[in-house]
Amino acid sequence: MNAARLLETLTHQGLTLFAQGARLIVRPGNLLTANDETLIREHKEGLLRLLVEKDAATLTASLEQAGPAGLDWREGTPADWSDARLLAAGEVLYAAGHMVNRNGRRYLKERAPSLPLTATTPANDAP
């Protein structure tokens, strides 16, 4: 069984999985069987990767909906997400070059406002 199929199976059983840093959290724990625990251990890395990518897709959808207004830190993401979970999803988008942070707000790269010119950043048309 691959990680994607396992995640689908566990979700269908009524379990919720989420990544918390390098930890994989499964709730409610009382629904886990010994076989589930074995499979989760075997596929932990793949499950973590899938969950973070899924969270990144959720964050991307929120950023698309926000458009040029962008999002504040907790804005536009599920209320049950921890700061660590939000940070992990954001890191995926930052690393891929899809999200930028400007003036304390997050934007899809193509929707972000321009950076203001500074003394160390000359204008392109400067003599």
Image (spheres, rainbow, N blue to C red):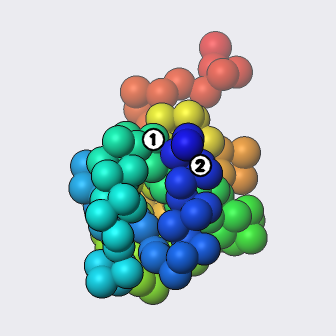
Question: Do the CB atoms of the residues marked 2 and 1 lie less than 8 Å apart?
Answer: yes
Query: Observer-nearest residue: 4 or 91?
Result: 4
Q: Secondary structure at mark 1?
A: helix
Query: Observer-nearest residue: 124 or 32?
Result: 32
Coordinates of residue 111 in the picture (x, y in percent): 71, 53
Tell whether 53 sits left or right of 90: right
Tell whether 45 sits left or right of 65: left
Q: Quadrant of residue 68?
A: bottom right
Coordinates of residue 95 in the picture (x, y in percent): 48, 35
User: Exactly how many numbered labels are in the figure?
Assistant: 2
The tag earlier along the polypeptide, 2 or 1, is 2
Residue placed under numbered mark 2 in the picture: 4
The disc at residue 46 is 1
Q: CA distance from mark 2 to mark 1?
A: 8 Å
Task: Please tell me which residue is depicted at 30% across the width and 83% down the height of the picture.
Answer: 30
Q: Quadrant of residue 8?
A: bottom right
